Image: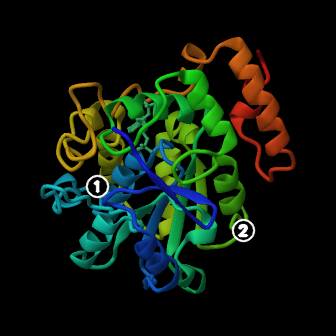
Amino acid sequence: KPMEFFNYKGVKFAKHMIFSEENLHFVENEFQVLDDDIYNVTYPKSGTTWMIEILSLICSNGDVAKAKIKTVPNYTRCPWYESTIGMKQIETLTPPRILTSHLPCHIFAKSFFTSNAKIIYTIRNPKDIIVSWYHYGKISLLLQCPEDFEEHLDCFLKGDFLYGSWFDHVWGWIQMKSSKNFFFITYEELQQDLRGSVMRICDFLGKKLDEAAIDSVLENTSFNIMKDNKMANYSYAGKSAVDLSKGSFMRKGISGDWKNQFTVAQSERFDRIYREKMKNFPVKFNWDEDGTEE
Ligand code: A3P
């Protein structure tokens, strides 16, 4: 599956039907953000689909049927607004909208920055992102990634990935850290304390859910339930994006799987570059120590 790419403001995008320079230009300069919009923003493979489920359920008060109400073929409840398909889907949404994006901060809709809309930004241990992406590359019909892991790792470290460099992505977005419209959380926090994380997200969104509703959010966003949820496991909405005969989208759902994939040398090389690029990063992550242990 040969793939061509184009560059938009220093960021790599795939040249296929879902991305276009015109749409990115529209998104950045003309797209109208609404004050009650909620944006689920991530670098790919950081827990985007998990957060879609969490936000859909919170916003429907834990009501599973309501959270799925917009489930029709090729329809995602929380469209990627930078894609041309997503843009069409958005036209059919009634506010309040939950939208998804992998865009780096410098290409995000300008109108966001003068609005009261909210962003939830999920960050994941980049070593796990690399592994998750590597496996996703095998089932994806839209994106290509090298079969050789070493080469895949090189591309990541050089920032030669769709949506650009992970390092630039997190550095860009973390500048919003003290904005009242911005909330960031890690994939690892979701795993360690889903209840606490969901409560904090509810607080940020100004949603008051009762115990039963919270319990429903927790239950329905667990890996095992989501694995069988056709909206989440891509067997429904994402059929045109993945070939599920080659592997599952809901793959392992754990932290630290990189240890099963990276060699010691690869891990050391990663850590050296990570330390250099993340020097003075305003937030410390639990993997920062972990990454140097071997
Ligand atoms: P793995 O490939 O490591 O299993 P994204 O949605 O950003 O593409 O991220 C996909 C990753 O999130 C996959 O990681 C997937 O298994 C994981 N994931 C999705 N839902 C999850 C959940 N409820 N709990 C834990 N991990 C989840």
Residue found at x 25% / y 75%? 93
Q: CA distance from mark 1 to mark 2?
A: 29 Å
The spot of residue 3 in percent (x, y) is 40, 45
Locate residue 269 relative to residue 185 in the image: left or right.
right
Give the labeled residue for mark 2: 178
Question: Residue 62 shows which numbered tag?
Answer: 1
Which quadrant of the view contains residue 192?
A: top right
- Quadrant where ligand 1 appears: top left
Q: Secondary structure at mark 2?
A: loop
**Residue type indicated by callout 1:** Gly
Task: Give the foreground label among 1 and 2.
Answer: 2
Residue found at x 28% / y 63%? 60
Work out whether residue 55 or residue 125 is closer to the camera in this orientation and state it.
125
Residue found at x 38% / y 58%? 55
How crowded pointer 1 is (Cα within 10 Å; few <14, some 14-19, many 20+) is rated as many
Q: Secondary structure at mark 1?
A: loop
The spot of residue 167 in percent (x, y) is 69, 48
Residue sitting at the far left: 72
Q: Is residue 230 above or below residue 66?
A: above
Q: Is residue 54 above or below residue 29?
A: above
**Residue type indicated by callout 2:** Ser
The spot of residue 122 in percent (x, y) is 55, 51
N-terminal of the pair, mark 1 or mark 2, is 1
Q: Is residue 128 above or below residue 27?
A: above
Locate residue 102 relative to residue 180 in the image: left or right.
left
Quarter occupied by the C terminus:
top right
Quarter occupied by the N terminus:
top left
Work out whether residue 159 or residue 38 is closer to the camera in this orientation and state it.
159
